[in-house]
Image (cartoon, coloured by chain):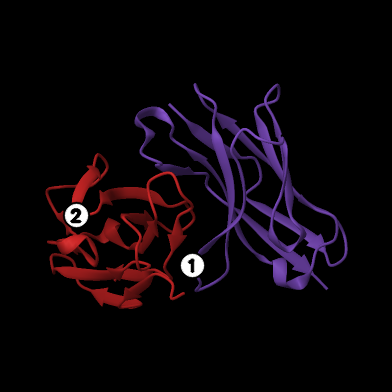
Amino acid sequence: EAGVAQSPRYKIIEKRQSVAFWCNPISGHATLYWYQQILGQGPKLLIQFQNNGVVDDSQLPKDRFSAERLKGVDSTLKIQPAKLEDSAVYLCASSRTDYNEQFFGPGTRLTVL
Amino acid sequence: AQSVTQLDSHVSVSEGTPVLLRCNYSSSYSPSLFWYVQHPNKGLQLLLKYTSAATLVKGINGFEAEFKKSETSFHLTKPSAHMSDAAEYFCVVSEEYGNTGKLIFGQGTTLQVKP
């Protein structure tokens, strides 16, 4: 079974630029999560989808971050405009339902200069 | 609100000696607790999980953890460390309120294994 795929693996941008990350969950997984992991900290949930609906986006900075999951499969996370403090690893995870084990992708490391 | 505190940011052991990574949790409900491991440039991997069944939970690669409600602890142990165990370890609690399955991560413990 293929795991959670993410791209790109690394991205370097300047502040005020925009960036987008892509995630392809494990086939058949209804729930998809985006986490932000700042260096030296544990991951923090940004947004959770159940199929293509948002379950929890309480910690998503909506003035600059947006996410979508069209057709309940792939998802994209966008930052516009980026700030220095957005430098982090962005992790995507998926699970069969919101009660099941979450499987994590390798992450996208974002550096904002 | 639920939270976890990992009591050590860095643990160093010699190969072949026991490993102890400490975690305390705070929860108003019966918690689900997890340990995840993160190797450099790799995704997070579930080591083990506690979901109100047996208090001693066995996981992969020889790790186990014991849920102690009276001490609100969920420490991770392994009898004999291997070089490949060197990684970042996260203690995690699942937010039960609202039943979203939301995971709340601790700050992480870096395990160093010396030859």
Quadrant for the N terminus of chain B, please.
Answer: top left
**Looking at the image, is A64 positioned above or below residue A19?**
above
Q: Which chain is purple?
A: B
Q: Considering the numbered disc 2 on the image, is that residue within a helix, a strand or a loop? A: loop
Residue A108 position by quadrant: bottom left
Residue A35 position by quadrant: bottom left
- Can residue B20 be seen here? The reply is no
In percent of width and height, residue B62 lies at: 77, 59
**Mark linked to residue A112:** none
In percent of width and height, residue A90 lies at: 34, 62
Give the side of residue A86 with respect to residue B82, left or right: left
In percent of width and height, residue A42 lies at: 47, 51
**Looking at the image, is B41 positioned above or below residue B18?**
below
**Tag 2 residue:** A52
Q: Residue at x 71, y 66 (%)?
A: B85
Between B58 and B43, the residue placed more toward the observer is B58
**Mark linked to residue B43:** 1
In percent of width and height, residue A100 lies at: 46, 49
Kindly check if marks 2 and 1 are in contact, taking CB atoms under 8 A apart as contact: no
Q: Considering the numbered disc 1 on the image, is that residue within a helix, a strand or a loop? A: loop
Give the side of residue A94 with respect to residue B58, left or right: left
The residues bearing labels 2 and 1 have C-alpha atoms spaced at a distance of 24 Å
Q: Chain of mark 1?
A: B
Quadrant for the C terminus of chain B, please.
Answer: bottom right
Between B31 and B19, the residue placed more toward the observer is B31
Q: Chain of mark 2?
A: A
Q: Residue at x 35, y 38 (%)?
A: B100
10 Å neighbourhood of mark 1: few (<14), some, or many (≥20)?
many
Circle nearer the viewer, 2 or 1: 2
Could you tell me the amino acid type at mark 1?
Gly
Could you tell me the amino acid type at mark 2?
Asn
Q: Colour of chain A?
A: red
